[in-house]
Image: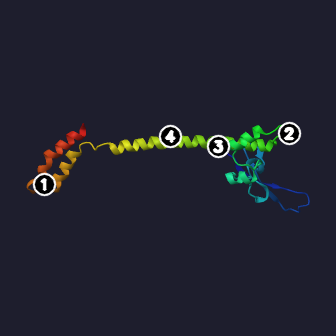
């Protein structure tokens, strides 16, 4: 799959002995492949691929102002008013129906996310309370070791060995 650049001369009638050169890629089997087929361009220009369009994120305010319905999430009163409206009133347009449905779905999603967040907060709160309620294992033995090293018996810290052994046995259980 190797290709090499080969320069060849092109003679033109009326060139009066001048020789023009052109570059061509030689691919498999010695056959010539145009530069454009290998990703090259003519006259030394770089090939430019169009960049993908940037993502667009719309805020809720944008939807409220420029959305097809222009109405906020429906309340229970507005739904009841639509249901109780007489039949002579014009039916809502397709855009209004889409906007109302979109707002209803967004309200449901917000409610689901809120309930999930509240459940997570309760779970984390009980876990933190359990952690804080726990007593430190071997706390008395640890305090005794700290006291021994702070004020060693007869000024010799090596005499704290038996107290440290008691702490180590407690900690291994």
Q: Nearer the viewer, mark 3 or mark 2?
A: 2
Q: Nearer the viewer, mark 3 or mark 1?
A: 3
Q: Nearer the viewer, mark 1 or mark 4?
A: 4
Instruction: Tell me, for residue 152, which label it has, or none.
Output: 1
Give me the C-alpha separation between circle 2 and circle 1.
97 Å
Secondary structure of the residue carrying numbered label 4:
helix
Q: Earlier in the sequence, mark 3 or mark 1?
A: 3
The residue under label 4 is 119
The residue under label 3 is 107
The residue under label 2 is 88
Q: Residues within 10 Å of mark 1 (few under 14, many from 20)?
A: some
Q: Nearer the viewer, mark 2 or mark 4?
A: 2
Q: Earlier in the sequence, mark 3 or mark 2?
A: 2
Residue under the image location 83 percent in, 37 percent down: 87
Left or right: residue 134 versus residue 2 is: left
Residue under the image location 85 percent in, 56 percent down: 11
Along the line of sight, which residue is nearer the eye, 73 or 76? 76
Along the line of sight, which residue is nearer the eye, 103 or 135? 103
Give me the C-alpha separation between circle 2 and circle 4.
47 Å
Note whether 125 is above or below 152 in the view shown.
Answer: above
Give me the C-alpha separation between circle 4 and circle 3.
18 Å
| Residue 33 place in picture, x, y as percent | 77, 46
Q: Earlier in the sequence, mark 4 or mark 3?
A: 3
């Amino acid at each position: 799959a190797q290709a090499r650049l080969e320069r060849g001369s092109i003679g033109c009638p009326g060139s009066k002995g001048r020789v023009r050169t052109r570059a061509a890629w030689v691919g498999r089997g010695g056959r010539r492949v145009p530069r454009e087929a290998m990703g090259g361009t003519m006259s030394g220009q770089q090939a430019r691929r169009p960049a993908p369009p940037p993502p667009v994120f719309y805020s809720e305010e944008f939807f409220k102002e420029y959305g097809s319905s222009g109405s906020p999430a429906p309340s229970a009163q507005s739904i009841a008013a639509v249901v109780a409206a007489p039949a002579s009133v014009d039916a809502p347009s397709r855009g209004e129906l889409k906007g109302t449905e979109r707002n209803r779905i967004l309200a449901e999603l917000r409610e689901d996310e809120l309930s999930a967040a509240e459940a997570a907060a309760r779970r984390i709160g009980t876990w933190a309370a359990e952690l804080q309620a726990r007593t430190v294992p071997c706390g008395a033995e640890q305090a005794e070791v700290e006291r021994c090293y702070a004020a060693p018996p007869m000024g010799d810290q090596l005499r704290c060995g038996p107290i440290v052994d008691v702490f180590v046995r407690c900690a291994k259980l």
